[in-house]
Image (spheres, rainbow, N blue to C red):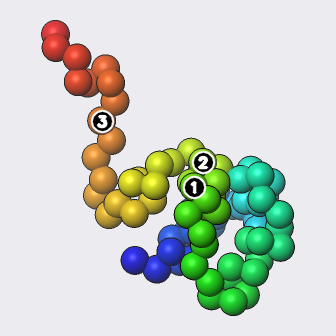
Amino acid sequence: MDVLSRIKTLMEARGWTAYRLASEAGLTESTIQNLFRRNGIPTLPTLEAVCSAFGITLSQFFADDDMVVVSYTHLRAH
């Protein structure tokens, strides 16, 4: 998986700019822009902050598109 492509896809889906992502993630805009400009791989803390901004877990970030979301209420016995 291309991490930067995944971040771009999530940004585009929300209509977010690098500034908005940085703001939501508690990062500087230059951190986000440098990732894309240098084709870098984000550090784990940076990726965790990005995932938090998108409201997803690291597992969800790396999951395939056909991911199934299971909530606690679905796991309780009836």
The image's mark for residue 31 is none
Q: Element at badge 3?
A: loop
Residue 62 drawn at (x, y percent): 39, 63
Circles 2, 1 touching at the beta carbon (< 8 Å)? yes
For mark 1, does the 10 Å Cα neighbourhood hold few (<14), some (14 to 19), or many (20 or more) residues? some
Q: Amino acid at mark 2?
A: Ser
Q: Is residue 52 left or right of residue 1?
A: right
Residue 54 drawn at (x, y percent): 60, 51
Q: Amino acid at mark 1?
A: Glu
Q: Is residue 30 left or right of residue 65?
A: right
Q: Is residue 32 left or right of residue 70?
A: right
Query: Quadrant of the rendered structure where residue 10 is?
Result: bottom right
Q: Which residue is mark 2?
A: 52
Q: Which residue is mark 1?
A: 48
- Disc number lying in front (1 or 3): 1
Q: Which residue is mark 3?
A: 70
Q: Is residue 77 above or below residue 70?
A: above
Query: Quadrant of the rendered structure where residue 55 is?
Result: top right
- Which circle's residue, 3 or 2, is located before the other in the chain? 2
Q: CA distance from mark 1 to mark 3?
A: 21 Å
- Disc number lying in front (3 or 2): 2
Observer-nearest of 38 and 45: 45
Q: Element at badge 2?
A: helix
Q: Residue at x 77, y 71 (%)?
A: 31
Observer-nearest of 66 and 29: 29
